Image (spheres, rainbow, N blue to C red):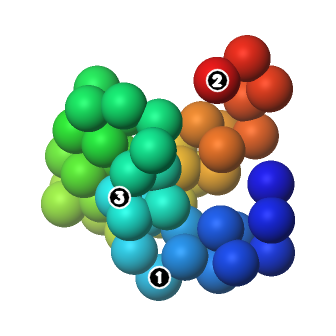
Amino acid sequence: MSFWRVVLSIFCPPLAVLDKGCGSILIVFILWCLGWIPGVIAALIILNNPKR
């Protein structure tokens, strides 16, 4: 996980997970619309997952 991905996930979480698939983008976008913090947490968890 690069520094720029972390910064991007703080400011706009759906853009940070753009290459992780449509499902990840949709989940992060919905959580981001419900609240900024849940979207950021979800984006960081998805970015930190080594399997994807």
The answer to whether mark 3 and mark 1 are in CB contact below 8 A is: no
Crowding at dot 3, Cα within 10 Å, few <14 / some 14-19 / many 20+, comes out as: many
19 is higher (above) or lower (below) than 40? above
Label 1: which residue? Answer: 11
Q: Could you tell me which secondary element the residue under label 3 belongs to?
A: helix
Residue 41 coordinates in the image, percent (x, y): 57, 51
- The residue under the point 80% across, 65% down is 2
- The residue under the point 39% across, 74% down is 12
The kind of residue tagged 3 is: Pro
The answer to whether mark 1 and mark 2 are in CB contact below 8 A is: no
Q: Could you tell me which secondary element the residue under label 2 belongs to?
A: loop
How far, Cα to Cα, is label 3 from label 1?
9 Å
Residue 25 coordinates in the image, percent (x, y): 31, 42
Query: Would residue 38 be visible to someone looking at this image?
Result: no
Quarter of the picture containing the C terminus is top right
16 horizontally vs 35: left or right? right
Res. 32 image quadrant = bottom left
23 is higher (above) or lower (below) than 3? above
The kind of residue tagged 1 is: Phe
- The residue under the point 36% across, 31% down is 21
Q: Camera-side residue: 26 or 19?
A: 19
Label 3: which residue? Answer: 14
Label 2: which residue? Answer: 52
Q: Earlier in the sequence, mark 2 or mark 3?
A: 3
Q: Nearer the viewer, mark 1 or mark 2?
A: 2
Residue 30 coordinates in the image, percent (x, y): 20, 46
Q: Could you tell me which secondary element the residue under label 1 belongs to?
A: helix
21 horizontally vs 29: left or right? right
Crowding at dot 1, Cα within 10 Å, few <14 / some 14-19 / many 20+, comes out as: few
Q: Earlier in the sequence, mark 1 or mark 2?
A: 1
